[in-house]
Amino acid sequence: MAFFTHQIRRGFSSSIIKNGVIKNVTIIGGGQMGAGIAQVAASTGHTVTLVDTSEDILKKSRKGIEGSLKRVVKKKFADKPEAGEEFIQNVLQNVSISTDAGASVQAADLLLEAIVENLKVKQDLFGHLDELAPANTIFASNTSSLPITDIAGSTSRLDRFGGLHFFNPVPMMKLVEVVGTSTTSQETFDSLLNFSKALGKTPVSCKDTPGFIVNRLLVPYMMEALRLHERGHGSKEDIDIAMKLGAGYPMGPFELCDYVGLDTVKFIIDGWSAKDPHNPLFASSELLNKLVAEGKYGKKTGEGFYKYK
Ligand SMILES: CC(=O)CC(=O)SCCNC(=O)CCNC(=O)[C@H](O)C(C)(C)COP(=O)(O)OP(=O)(O)OC[C@H]1O[C@@H](n2cnc3c(N)ncnc32)[C@H](O)[C@@H]1OP(=O)(O)O
Ligand SMILES: NC(=O)C1=CN([C@@H]2O[C@H](COP(=O)(O)OP(=O)(O)OC[C@H]3O[C@@H](n4cnc5c(N)ncnc54)[C@H](O)[C@@H]3O)[C@@H](O)[C@H]2O)C=CC1
């Protein structure tokens, strides 16, 4: 049985979002976040099209979704393996993959972007898709750190644009930050909030401020751990152990940086530092810059602060 089809559901000539209820979701970016969101949306009965730049990347996304679903099923269907396998097949049936963003947005109630953390790249994508997507399709970004207002400015649908910020790993993390700008309509905000609930997540409402709630607190903490290490005040291993055993965090800050992706952490901190260069919380780290320059982005590339198989 084919797990995924490459076919776009062309039967729809335009999005048919009814009463603001999101059913068809197109996710642009099949990396760790996009694939995770696709998995959770498909698991909760949504129809998902996952878009990336190449078939190879999408094959990797598919493998990641299957692997994660197996972990979920192991627990959820512990004593019913056949029902677990059926669940996996049903979820996978809900996901199509495509390298054609323009075609895949035709039936979308929601277009959710999870590509690289770069304002210009996101603006180009949204500006382009704004011309192709049905007028009533809601646009949202999963950005970690960029102002939603700046991203939305590349489109003409300021009232139908918001932020939907998930956490990594998406299948495990319960929170979604729902972000409204000064122009996001109440209807759009409510649709995004209700969509988060339909995914089984707990949404919180955020203003469009840098890093929203979690990252505004978490990223300066992670960066301070790197600087503490650079000052020679602790090994990365000891700092990680200290924060896990002394503060109850599930991962230490170096492990977490590797988990998030060092490229993403650098994009976040460089972006904030450029806007507020004298804020010591946003100071850079040479060690981070060096690892990123070497292409060592953390878990996703097999090496960051630590090595992964
Ligand atoms: C940068 C941003 O913009 C915002 C962000 O996302 S910041 C990052 C936020 N995320 C965090 O802080 C993550 C912190 N880490 C954790 O919560 C945990 O370490 C973790 C959930 C990732 C893993 O948990 P763990 O106990 O360390 O490891 P592990 O035993 O492998 O996993 C625990 C359970 O989660 C499941 N799990 C972990 N990752 C999973 C995934 N991707 N898919 C499905 N299940 C997964 C495992 O199967 C396991 O299930 P059981 O308990 O049934 O065995
Ligand atoms: N990694 C994390 O912990 C979190 C990341 N985010 C945000 O989510 C976004 C994605 O992050 P990750 O999934 O970690 O990155 P990633 O590097 O794992 O994946 C990004 C994907 O986007 C694809 N892509 C890039 N440009 C594209 C384009 N124009 N069209 C289609 N696909 C394109 C890439 O090929 C790649 O597969 C970023 O904005 C990041 O800040 C948000 C929450 C947590």
Image (tube, rainbow, N blue to C red):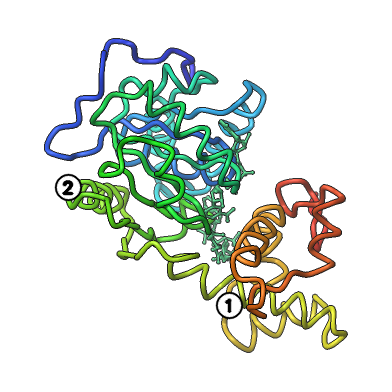
Q: At which x and y percent is residue 28?
A: 49, 33
Query: What residue is shown at x 54% (from left), y 36% (from top)?
Result: 29
Tell whether 94 sits left or right of 308.
left
Q: Which image quadrant is residue 289 in?
A: bottom right
Give the vertical position of 105 relative to 306 (above or below).
above
Circle number at residue 71? none
Given contact means CB atoms under 8 Å apart, are the residues at marks 1 and 2 in contact? no
Give the vertical position of 83 relative to 15 (above or below).
below
Q: Earlier in the sequence, mark 1 or mark 2?
A: 2
Q: Nearer the viewer, residue 160 or 234?
A: 160
Callout 2 secondary element: helix
Query: What residue is shown at x 42% (from left), y 52% (from top)?
Result: 148
Q: Disc 2 residue type?
A: Glu
Circle number at residue 187? 2
Whether disc 1's CB lies below 8 Å from ligand 1 is answered yes
Callout 1 secondary element: loop
Per the image, the residue denoted by label 1 is 249
**In 3D space, how far apart are the residues under numbered discs 1 and 2 (Cα atoms)?**
37 Å
Query: What residue is shown at x 32% (from left), y 65% (from top)?
Result: 204
Q: At which x and y percent is residue 120?
A: 58, 41
Q: Disc 1 residue type?
A: Tyr
Tell us which disc is closer to us: 1 or 2: 2
Q: At which x and y percent is residue 134?
A: 28, 24
Q: At which x and y percent is residue 214?
A: 47, 69
The residue lying furthest to the left in this view is 19
